[in-house]
């Protein structure tokens, strides 16, 4: 083992948090657009739909928009419905 002092340090890498998926971007567009009421996402098989539904629910919870959308899955199709709160 070799220990060195007073060395030139490399630049620290900055993480940007990764790229947002198409589905997550579409869900944010749904929430922010007043003309859209719902959307559906269809997948080739049920396994992919289950996985993506869980990801979308976690994304909504992390972004604190889970009270603005209702996400559910039937077979290989995910449905996202905008929840309108009454005043």
Image (cartoon, rainbow, N blue to C red):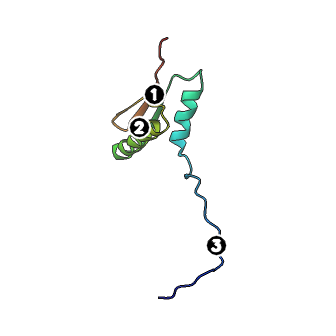
For marks 2 and 3, give the one nearer the viewer: 3
The residue wearing badge 3 is 10
Check disc 1 and report its element: helix, strand or loop. strand
Whether the residues at callouts 1 and 2 have beta carbons within 8 Å, the answer is: no
Give how far apart the Cα atoms at labels 1 and 3 are: 44 Å
Q: Residue at x 33, y 36 (%)?
A: 75
Query: Measured along the vertical axis of the image, is residue 80 above or below residue 58?
Result: above
Q: Residue at x 47, y 12 (%)?
A: 86
Q: Residue at x 49, y 11 (%)?
A: 87
- Label whose residue precedes the other's in the sequence (1 or 2): 2
How many C-alpha atoms fall within 10 Å of the one at disc 3: few (<14), some, or many (≥20)?
A: few
Give how far apart the Cα atoms at labels 2 and 3 are: 38 Å
- Where on the picture, by quarter, is residue 51? top left
Measuring from the top left, give residue 28's x and y in whole percent: 55, 34
How many C-alpha atoms fall within 10 Å of the one at disc 2: few (<14), some, or many (≥20)?
A: some
Query: Measured along the vertical axis of the image, is residue 75 above or below residue 70?
Result: below
The residue wearing badge 2 is 57
Give how far apart the Cα atoms at labels 1 and 2 are: 9 Å
- Label whose residue precedes the other's in the sequence (2 or 3): 3
- Label whose residue precedes the other's in the sequence (1 or 3): 3
The residue wearing badge 1 is 69
């Amino acid at each position: 083992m070799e220990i060195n002092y007073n060395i030139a340090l490399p630049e620290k890498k900055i993480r940007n948090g990764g790229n947002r998926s198409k589905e997550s971007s579409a869900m944010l567009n749904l929430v922010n657009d007043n003309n859209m009421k719902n959307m559906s996402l269809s997948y080739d098989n049920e396994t992919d739909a289950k996985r993506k539904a869980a990801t979308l629910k976690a994304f909504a919870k992390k972004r604190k928009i889970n009270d603005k959308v209702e996400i559910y899955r039937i077979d290989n199709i995910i449905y996202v419905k905008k929840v309108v709160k009454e005043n």
